[in-house]
């Protein structure tokens, strides 16, 4: 589904990703782990099409289509979704209005009729309920004054409503207490399906106890330096990233 | 005294020739008021950018034109009139159109033209008490000019204790030939003790013609009265609009003002509120959306004269193209006004590199027991927010439209009159469509 060959990205001339390779197939859950500053968030943003980075790659394809020069809204409509580490606060735009605009943008791309406010409301309510999001939060301005946990849950709500084919979750677990973490993890697990792939970007192993990955990759210095199964995550939890950093330096 | 210029003389001559036919001509006190207005106008002359209050607004385009007094103009139909339900007064080129105005004789308050009110002996004493009292013609040439030449306008008097359920609409339409012409609407609103009203002034330009609307509205808010006031300015793109609102608030009176500017080539709004008794409160909301080479200038001044009065102010500007915006918000806390609570914000969004905003909060505090806060921000479109929306499948133009609407929502959403709010939303959407197409 997603093929990445030799992906590099830089900002203001400063390289962040330096030749990253990754292949993700439908139905798989991949975890990208790494210490702060290793390029995890840049990787997630680059996949979604953030244009502040200068990006080059031998291949960056999604379902066989080259997405390297594709605008972010087109990527989104084709099924790429990024749950933001820091969702943007947008005053004056109600959460519900935003959600409906997003869902309808994707629906009309798929040739489906747009949902009116009433139909959408009932759909959104149902999904919101499972994430502990009440009507008041749906009616508030998007992310404005939301707590950290509310913002993360709202990102998962978008994931559920937009039903993407590839979901990239950037630090969806950071700053959450254990109850909120379970809600978020349940939301993600509910989205696992044979025709959908999920990339979980995280600093901590904790989320991976709940969302068990098929593959774990360690990102260091803008490259994937090690890949393995779910046990790699546990190993990292015990030993930290230091030993891999030393290995990477030695090689 | 400065020399009277040829430009000013045009209006002095007009004044001499029509003064006998202007409303209130037979009343000596009105005569005096007008004469003082003309004298002040001649003394002051047109303001120049050397004056602090006109630093960023050059009125030369107005000064250079010799505007004729507007002549009566009949319109076969007026678009969107349904947006302004009864009770309403409709003026075209400054003159009342009785057939479009729907005043119910059973109304339990007084809504009539200022001319009719001046002719009505029962209204005489109350008008005399208020008309011109809140407008300092010796400091503002346009207000002085209006005072000399006003030909029509609305008089609204709400008796003590009455709550007026329906919003009252005053609609001023610019149309027709004989350009360039000027009209001078003069409105007086007297709210009795404990009364409550909502009134909406809408200025609309129907044709792309050169004209000047020079308007003055005086508001006398009696003790414990509640006033919700709207000024919607939608002059046409070559129209000039200079408007002054002077409000005087008595004990525990409350005024919420919404000033929204969409049109006009050069627009200047002056809003002066005098909190002249304990417990008075005003909230001033403003929104101006400006594109092309237009200029919109909002000057507000709140005088805290007595203790325990409070004020809230939020003005927002959206500027595109090579437009210019000005916000100058003065808050003056006088010696006796202890426990004053005043908050002012000016927030501005620039959609192009060439657009300009000059925003200046001006706090003058003459005692030390007050809580005052002010802040001003100027920003561009938030690229993080645009990307966030893009990443959800929303295209660039729609994303920008959503964000600008969100920015304006803080002002538009608090418009309580639903027909006005819906109108504003449509107007803003139309404006955004044009502006985002260009960029």
Image: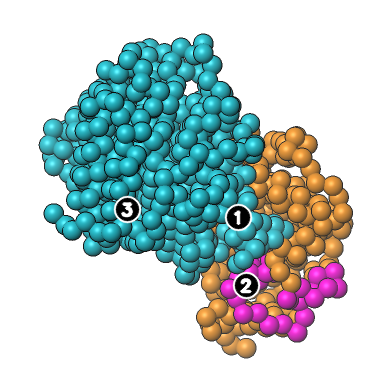
Name the residue rendered at 56%, 23% in the picture.
B102
Which residue is label 2 attached to? A51
Q: Mark 1 lies on which chain?
A: B
Which tag, 1 or 3, sits closer to the chain's start?
3
Magenta range is A42-69
Residue indicated by mark 1: B432
Residue A48 location, x and y as percent? 68, 66
Q: What element carries label 2?
A: loop
> Which percent across, then down, holds residue B212?
43, 49
Q: Is residue B44 visible?
A: yes
Question: In the rendering, what colour is chain B?
Answer: cyan
Drawing shade for chain A = orange
Q: Is residue B413 visible?
A: no
Picture quadrant of residue A207: bottom right
Q: Which residue is drawn at 63% across and 31% down?
A: B82
In-image side of B328 versus B438 (left or right): left
Q: In this view, does A171 lie above or below A60?
A: above
- The verdict on a common chain for dots 3 and 2 is no
């Amino acid at each position: 589904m997603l093929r990445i060959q030799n992906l590099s990205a830089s900002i203001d001339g400063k390289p962040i990703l330096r030749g990253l390779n990754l292949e993700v197939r439908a139905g798989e859950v991949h975890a990208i782990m790494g210490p702060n500053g290793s390029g995890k968030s840049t990787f997630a943003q680059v996949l979604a099409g953030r244009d502040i980075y200068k990006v080059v790659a031998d291949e960056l394809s999604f379902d066989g289509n080259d997405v390297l020069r594709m605008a972010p809204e087109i990527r989104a409509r084709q099924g790429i979704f990024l749950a933001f580490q820091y969702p943007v606060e947008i005053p004056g735009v109600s959460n519900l209005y935003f959600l409906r605009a997003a869902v309808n943008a994707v629906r009309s791309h798929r040739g489906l009729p747009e949902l009116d406010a009433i139909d959408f409301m009932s759909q959104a309510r149902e999904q919101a309920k499972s994430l502990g999001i009440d009507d008041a939060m749906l009616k508030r301005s998007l992310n404005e004054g939301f707590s950290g946990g509310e913002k993360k849950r709202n990102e998962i709500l978008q994931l559920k409503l937009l039903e993407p084919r590839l979901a990239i979750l950037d630090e969806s677990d950071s700053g959450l207490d254990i109850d909120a973490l379970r809600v978020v993890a349940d939301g993600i697990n509910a989205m696992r399906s044979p025709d959908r792939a999920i990339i979980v970007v995280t600093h901590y192993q904790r989320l991976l106890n709940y969302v068990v990955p098929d593959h774990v990759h360690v990102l260091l210095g803008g490259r994937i330096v090690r890949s393995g199964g779910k046990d790699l995550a546990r190993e990292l939890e015990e030993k930290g990233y230091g030993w891999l950093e030393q290995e990477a330096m030695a090689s | 005294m400065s020399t009277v210029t040829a430009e000013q003389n045009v209006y002095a001559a007009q004044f001499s020739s029509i003064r006998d036919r202007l409303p209130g001509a037979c009343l000596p006190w009105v005569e005096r008021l007008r004469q003082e207005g003309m004298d002040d106008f001649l003394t002051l002359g047109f303001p120049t950018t050397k004056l602090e209050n006109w630093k960023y607004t050059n009125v030369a385009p107005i000064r250079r034109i010799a505007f004729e007094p507007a002549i009566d103009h009949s319109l076969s139909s007026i678009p969107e009139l349904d947006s302004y339900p009864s009770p309403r007064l409709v003026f075209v080129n400054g003159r009342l159109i009785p057939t479009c105005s729907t005043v119910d004789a059973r109304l339990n308050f007084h809504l009539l033209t200022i001319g009719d009110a001046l002719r009505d002996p029962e209204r005489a004493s109350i008008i005399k008490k208020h008309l011109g009292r809140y407008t300092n013609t010796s400091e503002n040439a346009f207000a002085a000019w209006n005072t000399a030449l006003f030909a029509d306008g609305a008089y609204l008097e709400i008796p003590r204790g009455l709550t007026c359920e329906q919003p009252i609409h005053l609609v001023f339409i610019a149309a027709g030939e004989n350009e360039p012409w000027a009209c001078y609407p003069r409105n007086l609103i007297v709210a009795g003790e404990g009364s409550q009203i909502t009134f909406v002034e809408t200025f609309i330009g129907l044709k792309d013609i050169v004209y000047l609307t020079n308007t003055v509205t005086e508001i006398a808010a009696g003790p414990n009265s509640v006033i919700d006031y709207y000024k919607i300015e939608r002059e046409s793109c070559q129209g000039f609009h200079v408007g002054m609102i002077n409000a005087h608030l008595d004990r525990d009176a409350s005024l919420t003002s919404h000033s929204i500017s969409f049109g006009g080539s050069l627009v200047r709004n002056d809003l002066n509120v005098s909190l002249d008794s304990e417990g008075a409160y005003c909230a001033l909301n403003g929104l101006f959306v400006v594109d092309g080479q237009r200029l919109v200038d909002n000057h507000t001044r709140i005088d805290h004269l007595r203790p325990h009065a409070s004020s809230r102010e939020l003005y927002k500007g959206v500027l595109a193209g090579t437009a210019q915006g000005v916000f100058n918000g003065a808050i003056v806390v006088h010696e006796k006004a202890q426990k004053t609570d005043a908050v002012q914000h000016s927030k501005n969004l620039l959609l192009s590199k060439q657009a300009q905003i000059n925003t200046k909060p001006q706090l003058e505090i003459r005692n030390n027991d007050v809580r005052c806060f002010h802040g001003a921000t100027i920003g561009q479109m938030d690229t993080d927010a645009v990307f966030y929306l893009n990443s959800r499948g929303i295209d660039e133009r729609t994303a920008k439209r959503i964000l600008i609407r969100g920015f304006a929502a803080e002002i538009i959403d608090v418009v309580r009159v639903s027909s006005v709010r819906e109108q504003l939303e449509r107007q803003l959407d139309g404006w955004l469509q044009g502006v985002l197409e260009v960029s």
